[in-house]
Image (tube, rainbow, N blue to C red):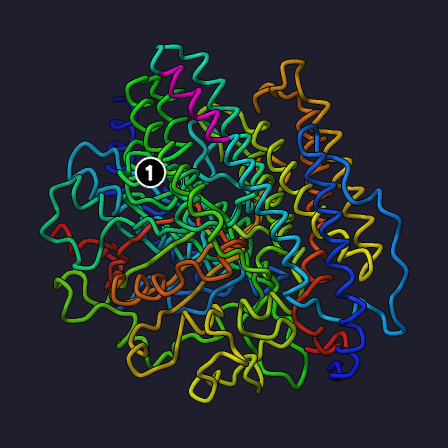
Amino acid sequence: MIDRRTFLRRSATTLAAAGAGASLHALESSANAVADSTADGGSAALLNASLTQRVPFEGLHQAGVATKPPPQAIFIALDSIADSRAELAEALRTLSVRARVLSAGATPPVTVEGITVDSGILGPSFPPDRLTVTVGFGASLFDRYGLAAQRPGSLVPMRTFPNDELDPAQCHGDVLLQLRAGSVDTNLHARRDLLNATRGALQVRWTIDGFLPPNRTRKGHPVVAGRNLLGFHDGIANPTDAELDHLVWAGSEAPEWARGGTYAVVRIIRNRVEFWDRVSLREQEEMIGRRKDTGAPLSGGNALTPPRYDDDPRGEKVSLEAHIRLANPRTSATDGQRILRRGYNYARGTDGAGQLDEGLIFASYQRDIHRQFETIQERLIDEPLVDYIVPVGGGYFFLPPGARGSDDWVGSGLFA
Amino acid sequence: MLRSAPSLLSSSSALATLVGAALAGAALALSACGGAASTTAAHNPPAQPLSAQAPDEVPVRASELKAPIAAYRRWVARQLGETAGAVATLRERLDADDVTGARAAWTRAVRAYAAIGAAYGAFGEADTQINGSSDGRPGGDRDPHFSGLQRVELALWHHASLAEGRHWAQRLAMNIATLRERLPRLEIDPAEYLLRAHEVLENSLSLDLTGHNVRYSHEAVDVIAGREQGATVVLGTLTPLLRIRDRSTELRATQAMRRLSREVASLRSSGGGYPTLDALSMRSHERLAGVLANAAQALAPVPEALDLRPPPQPRAPGLE
């Protein structure tokens, strides 16, 4: 169990703070690292000023859910191999400690001998670059460590829906890490750092990288969500900030430690892009229910115009089986089912037959997985679009509330 | 462009003569099915334009698809018979504790069934019972509702259990018999029939060639051979309708299917079987994937060329 001992020793040095010069955690062991980042942040002299933008780690809610999504994301599902609840808690605490440093920017100390303190892929110091690290727990974590009594009510293992082709190696996980940043390498740097820091306690189960398209809106046109790899605007109809307390954040229905958190549904949905490209525009638009060029619903208006179904009961404008109509029928009964979608596109090489492996990392946040996501998903079973979109992985996770201060860590309430 | 009623009427009488041509094409395709099924109505002389109006702007009437669908139904009946025969042999071999013989019979059955072209939920629940996968089932491959050819495959290869094989082969034989009995009354939607040829190939690309399908025995090339045969037959039934509407699509589709047939035939062993997917060289796998994808692409415009609905309004490019 050398790994575990190493891990514990590293954690101990983190706690001790002093004399940790050669330790992996030297850089975060004092408040200096954070102070560095605000004073110089490794960023004051950067030509590219956007790299200096910082999203606070602490807050009532975790960053990386309602905060404006930067263009790059990495999702990592981990399984815990910690031998005890205390070791698990220590690993989770370490995640927050590292996340705080990574999202603030820092200048890691230079060590010439021993394990490399920092991968160095961002240079001798790294700026914040809007990095957020969001931590979630899968249902299996609660069962594995005797925490079932504290499990938030609607957290269960992800269901298999009839049109799924799930690969077990890309499903579920005890812990979810969701990284978002302005650049790909900021995320890659954070991923290596977080995995190094928790080696021996958390083991990678699956991970996937995603991206958002840049804003391609033309002047004088409404700004709408970017396009997915089917070529359609995706995420047009999201709840407003004012609706999040009602639709996204866990409230009094949740155990006390969990209030202010939310439930995340992550689904890796492969798009059969070659097949899709062989389909006519007319057919594509009928399946989606929106125009491909403008994003406007087929019932008229522009992208931001709500689709009209009340005067189209037979689906002459927007087909009764159109994706947007099934997903959100826009009735008072389905209004409370709405979810916050923050999906990212992915492209990762080819499958075994030379077909491109591209698609959507669907990520939604809601207050109740069954009442919201699953109810919507049930309406989408066997929709015409299913021939072109194949869920292959993902999981359900609970994202605890944010860390309350510089000593707190995400998930601490679970172990209180 | 909305078509006026008079133009529809004037062309309909001319189109009526095509039903006969469609039947001829279908019959030709069927007669070729015993072998590689590679020659289709392409032997027929090209038809001349029938009226001043470009025929590709005339929506196909559902009635024009009656003959192709009837021909296809006969093909399905024949293939179901062949599947049933192979399943009978499979059960016999299982009863004789002959694993090798059972596996060979299973492979013949799955190839014969693939040639029906029951992709994308055609035949609904009946198809799921005969050839459904464990995908989308809560219990995965242990799910009690997972049955059919792929359940037998799991038993024969992955579990290597004859008893299990016997149990599921018996259920399979029953379900095939039920579908055979129901087939004459089974509704085949003309709009869906038009999609069949290329969707069968799409299934091969996404499921067979990746090893996702036929995942226990790896006999995916047999399935691809079956699907190629089915797609060739379906395309053959549609060729006469296609020829007068969209000659270039017809030529491209026919050529691409011939190339695919040749590629599949080149992989066939002297005994009539095919190598397993993992036995294909990288080059053979690449060639098969490329030729299949090319055929899928060439066949994709067929449904639109024979659309039952009037063509959509043209649209200016670059509108955002």
Q: Which residues are magenta?
A: B83-94
B147 with respect to B185 (left or right):
left
| Residue drawn at the location 57% of the way across and 43% of the way down | B117
User: How many numbered circles are shown?
Assistant: 1
Q: Is residue A125 above or below residue B258?
A: below
Taking the spot 32% from the left edge, 59% from the top edge, the residue there is: A264
- In the image, residue A360 sits, relative to residue A3, either above or below, namely below
Q: Residues within 10 Å of mark 1 (few under 14, many from 20)?
A: many
Q: Where residue A103 appears, x then y in whole percent?
A: 42, 57
Residue B132 in the image, given as x and y percentages of width and height:
41, 40
Q: Quadrant of residue B93?
A: top left
Left or right for A252, reference A325:
left
Judge left or right: residue B199 versus residue A62.
right
Q: Quadrant of residue B270?
A: top right
Between A81 and B61, which is closer to the camera in this rendering? B61
Which residue is denoted by mark 1 in the rendering? B146
In the picture, the quarter occupied by the N terminus of chain A is top left
Q: Is residue A286 visible?
A: yes
Residue at x 56%, y 45% (from the top left corner)? A123
| Observer-nearest of B216 and B46 | B46
